């Protein structure tokens, strides 16, 4: 498991292999399909991310000083977006998650490719992941 910075560099490299956004979208959708499923018991109102146009459930727990995230969404593109965030932030220490500069989002041009509501959803996902890390850090 690499550092947040290393994982982001890998994602940027992956996205550079594609010629256009159609291919990048397909890649995101594939990432969503590979996402480990969230347990049904965590698909609750509390775990829904507010501010997302589609429904996104996010769960976090602390294991051996690291935060482990699981998620699901009812929209394939949104599932891909949460999957890429989990790839970067899951299995990292809470303090590193909270202070993470997720520069890969701008580097791959993701925000510009999303509708305004999806871009807001992306920001909401990151906020919720960092809030979970903060809360679990103190446990």
Image: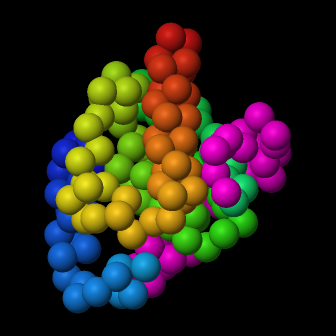
Above or below residue 91? Residue 116 is below
Q: Position of residue 39 (x, y in %)?
A: 74, 51
Q: Position of residue 135 (x, y in %)?
A: 55, 18
Residue 38 in magenta?
Answer: yes
Among the 4 quarters of the image, the one containing residue 54: bottom right
> Farthest residue in the top direction?
138
- Looking at the image, residue 101 sits to the left or right of residue 131; the answer is left
Is residue 48 visible in the rendered image? The answer is yes
**Residue occupying image coordinates x 46% and y 31%:** 130
Q: Position of residue 72 (x, y in %)?
A: 66, 58
Is residue 68 visible in the rendered image? The answer is no
**Residue occupying image coordinates x 36% and y 87%:** 23
Q: Quadrant of the C terminus?
A: top right
Q: How many marks?
A: 0
Q: Nearer the viewer, residue 113 or 86?
A: 113
**Residue occupying image coordinates x 44% and y 84%:** 26
Above or below residue 124? Residue 14 is below
- Looking at the image, residue 135 sits to the left or right of residue 113; the answer is right
Residue 63 in magenta?
Answer: no
Q: Position of residue 92 (x, y in %)?
A: 36, 36
Q: What colour scheme was applied to this rendering of the protein?
A: rainbow
Above or below residue 132? Residue 16 is below
Q: Which range of residues does the magenta coloring cover? A: 26-53
Above or below residue 50? Residue 16 is below
**Residue occupying image coordinates x 55% and y 51%:** 121
- Looking at the image, residue 74 sits to the left or right of residue 16; the answer is right
């Amino acid at each position: 498991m690499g550092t947040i910075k290393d994982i982001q560099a890998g994602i940027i490299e992956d996205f550079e292999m594609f010629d256009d956004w159609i291919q990048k979208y397909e890649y995101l959708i594939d990432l969503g399909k590979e996402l480990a499923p969230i347990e049904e018991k965590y698909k609750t109102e509390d775990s829904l991310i507010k501010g997302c146009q589609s429904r996104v459930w996010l769960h976090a727990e602390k294991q051996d000083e690291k935060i482990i995230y699981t998620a699901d969404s009812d929209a394939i593109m949104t599932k891909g977006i949460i999957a890429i965030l989990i790839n970067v932030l899951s299995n990292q220490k809470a303090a590193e998650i909270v202070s993470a500069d997720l520069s890969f989002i701008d580097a791959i041009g993701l925000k510009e490719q999303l509708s305004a509501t999806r871009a807001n959803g992306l920001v909401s996902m990151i906020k919720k992941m960092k809030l979970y890390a903060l809360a679990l850090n103190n446990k």
